[in-house]
Image (cartoon, rainbow, N blue to C red):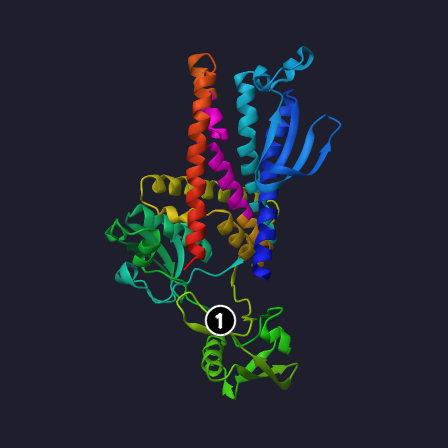
Amino acid sequence: MTEFLGSVGWFIVTLGLLITFHEFGHYWVARRLGVRVLRFSVGFGRPLWRRVGRDGTEYVVAAIPLGGYVRMLDERDGAVPPSIAAQSFNRQSVWARIAIVAAGPLANILFAIGAFWLMFVVGKPDFRPVIDEPTGIAATAGLVAGDELVRIDGRAVATWSEATIELVRVALAREDVEIEVREPDGDTRAVRLAVSTVPRHLDEREALAGIGLRARPPVAPAVVGRAIAGRPAATAGLRAGDAIESVNGRPVADFRALIEIVQAEAARSPRLEFAVRRDGERIVIPVEAEATRGADGAVRFTVGIAPPDLRDAVRRHGPLSALPAAVAETWRMTTTTFEFLGRMLVGHASLENLAGPVGIAQTANSSASLGLAWFLSFLALMSLSIGILNLLPIPILDGGHLMYYLIEIVKGSPVSERVMAAGQYVGLLMLAGLMGLAFYNDLARLLP
């Protein structure tokens, strides 16, 4: 229940922020160009809160937080008094209309740069890109466990998250790639991965597995990093920092061994005795393990203990150097997103990667639980996604309107109302199909 409420809460925070910035882009440019704004709405449906500003704009927060809109004075929507007709959107030059429409996606891009900047200033903790025992073409290329990835296809990687993004891009391209690695003794060497040999029919996840590179799992000591509130360990009195020496008398070497011992002992009896070292004193705490049944029917036992944080790499810059780094990160993620969209269109990337509200809410909650920097990174990626989606030439989206205006520049006159109306229907169908697929993917991930 706590996870559900957290997901809903962070989902509302995420969309509320990003929609507000997007619509504020339209609003700010429209006002600067002399267009009267009638309503600024965050969300759709029944208004939960409203206020009329001194400028005459009605500001609204509505019940359905899946979008928003800025409604401007427009003679196509009804009669407009001659005294304010010049403030109508339709009376503006084509270049002014382009500026107003493009301002929304541009605001999302600027928000992404700002979020990445703050992420770098705060510092994003991660794992070093050290590989475990390689398989597949990685093993054939001569990579060994303990090698640290330094560059992939000429792009520097300092964390496992960066390495994963580059490896997915390489797996989708199916082109041989050069990888530079640092050996445990500090020497570096270059190896060439024959990614072109990975079969084309595999999706990106299967192709990534075919490359055979995976992170080396860190060995965590048997120390309580966090006792999750409301779970058996916290209820019994275990605290962060407790060093677990044994469970039911069985010595515990590390956190992985702790998990195995809890499973084995709880299968006999869920009542466990944890011997822990706290402030130099050895104490025994009884803990009642919880049994859960997974989608595969297997029973697992949990006590609600999280391991200590073993992340050993931090992406951090000073306030000045963080700005070019944020711009570079925005550009890198923008090009990667367009590349990924292109491969989805031609069938080289799985459509299962599209996520709807449920997937977004779950990711928002999990990124927030990892800390401020990870949530800022998530916000930046979501903002970029919204900006890029709105720039697609689909009628009803900002990109569709920009397409109409570019046609108007070429032909010297506006697109006819009939063509625009037909485009609206086509755009609605395309958007409904896209949202339907995203909702289907959400349900497919939730249901066994």
Q: Amino acid at mark 1?
A: Thr
From the image, which quarter does the C terminus lie in?
Answer: bottom left
Rendered position, 237 above or below 51: below
Q: Where residue 14 sits: x, y (%)?
A: 58, 46
The residue furthest bottom is 249
Q: Where residue 226 sits: x, y (%)?
A: 59, 69
Dominant SS type (magenta): helix
Q: Where residue 181 sits: x, y (%)?
A: 37, 58
The residue sitting at 57% across, 25% down in the picture is 100
The residue sitting at 51% across, 47% down in the picture is 357
**Tag 1's secondary structure?**
strand
Rendered position, 366 above or below 54: below
Stretch in magenta: 379-404
Queried whether the magenta region covers residue 397, the answer comes back as yes
The residue furthest front is 46
Queried whether the magenta region covers residue 261, the answer comes back as no
Q: Is residue 321 visible?
A: no
Q: Which residue is mark 1?
A: 292
Q: Where residue 164 sits: x, y (%)?
A: 41, 54
